[in-house]
Image (cartoon, grey):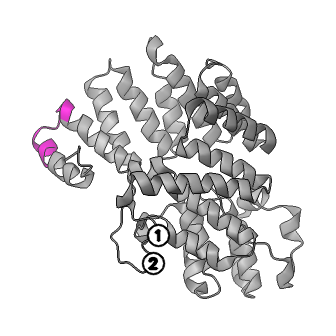
Amino acid sequence: MIKEQRYADTIKVLTTLFESHPDSRPCLSLLAHCHFYMQDFAAAATCYEKLVQICPEENIYKLYHAQSLHQACMYQEAWAVSLTIIDSSNLEYKVKKLQAAIKYGQEDMVAAKNLVDQCPLDDVDTEVNLGCLLYKEEEYEQALKKFSNALQITGFKPHLSYNVALSYFKLKEYAASLKHIADIIEQGIREHPELGVGMATEGIEVRSVGNTLTLHETALTEAFNLKAAIEYQLQNYEAAKEALTDMPPRSEEELDAVTLHNQALLNMDTKPSEGFEKLQFLLQQNPFPPETFANVLLLYCKYQYYDLAADVLAENVHLTYKYLTPFHDLCNNNDNNYHIYILQKS
């Protein structure tokens, strides 16, 4: 079943086996693997934590535990586990890269840069990570050089090509960005027709493809969100909506935060209540897309729900200093002054 990527079915079988064999290392290992491929990282972390308890000498389980926690955005917990991986020279650089990713997720760029600098210069991941740090510092041209160089070394990789496309987007070179997006989509369609790209837009009824690791590895979700962002910036609003419906179909509860955010924005004119509900839901998540907070306030003001905007501000004073700029403070009731932020990445 695992070979056929029937992870949900496999989890059901393994869960039943685990109830009668709670200390089974093979059962726990397979369960963790399946949960990770289903992108249920919290469940994967729980399995790996039990494996560490059963096999405390196996550093690889500690690494997988920390990786699962990192993917679940449980950064403090991931960092604590990563510090327990000692006397393992064969995992040293993998641990350094993971720790750099954790600090990056915590927005501690100084610590992240220090850890990346401890990694081998001839490792292409180091080049990519330096590009990510430059991107975070808004040095988009320098980031683009790093990503492009890595892409030349590795050959086509969806997420790396996406990083190049995103850098071009930030530089407002939309044609170049769309070219790389097209490459991602074309490969996704060619190699994974089962993901149903474009079928929903064509009116074909399709089942959810779920949040599998396969979907994540194609970078299709990110590519379509970025395509929607470009079309939105070009004021091609119908094309932006179409980009979101072209992505592999998932049920609403399976949608990532970026897609949910962008759906809310692009359908606000026709479904404002639904849009506000989605944005308010995202505000309750940790973490949530940073653009969410400003957009909730801007849209409440646009629709003249000033009391609701005031309530959001009062309930989230700490977010005001983190996510609002002087530009937002100057917005008034003139529709031409509103700028809605659409996300490009997840």
Placement of 122 over or under 165, stated as above or below: above
How far across and how far down the image is residue 207, in percent? 33, 70
Question: Given contact means CB atoms under 8 Å apart, are the residues at marks 1 and 2 in contact?
Answer: yes
Relative horizontal placement of residue 140, taking residue 245 as reference (left or right): right
Q: Is there any visible trace of residue 108 in the rendered image? A: no
Q: Is residue 149 magenta?
A: no
Q: Residues within 10 Å of mark 2 (few under 14, many from 20)?
A: few
Relative horizontal placement of residue 153, taking residue 308 as reference (left or right): left
Which residue in the structure is indicated by mark 2?
Answer: 202
At 46% from the left and 19% from the top, the residue drawn is: 91
Q: Tell me the quarter of the image containing the C terminus.
A: bottom right
Foreground pick, 300 / 192? 192
Which residue in the structure is indicated by mark 1?
Answer: 198
Disc 1 on helix, strand or loop?
loop
How far across and how far down the image is residue 318, in percent? 72, 58
At 58% from the left and 86% from the top, the residue drawn is: 271
Foreground pick, 220 / 27? 220
Residue 64's quadrant in the figure? top left
Foreground pick, 21 / 188? 188
Chief secondary structure of the magenta span?
helix
Placement of 7 over or under 227, stated as above or below: above
Task: Kindly report the distance in space between the C-alpha atoms of the residues bearing marks 1 and 2.
Answer: 6 Å
The residue type indicated by label 1 comes to: Gly
The residue type indicated by label 2 comes to: Glu
How far across and how far down the image is residue 249, in percent? 42, 68
Give the extent of the magenta segment.
Answer: 16-26
Q: Residues within 10 Å of mark 1 (few under 14, many from 20)?
A: some
Relative horizontal placement of residue 319, taking residue 31 as reference (left or right): right
Q: Is there any visible trace of residue 247 in the rendered image? A: yes
How far across and how far down the image is residue 156, in percent? 55, 40
Foreground pick, 87 / 158? 158
At 71% from the left and 79% from the top, the residue drawn is: 299
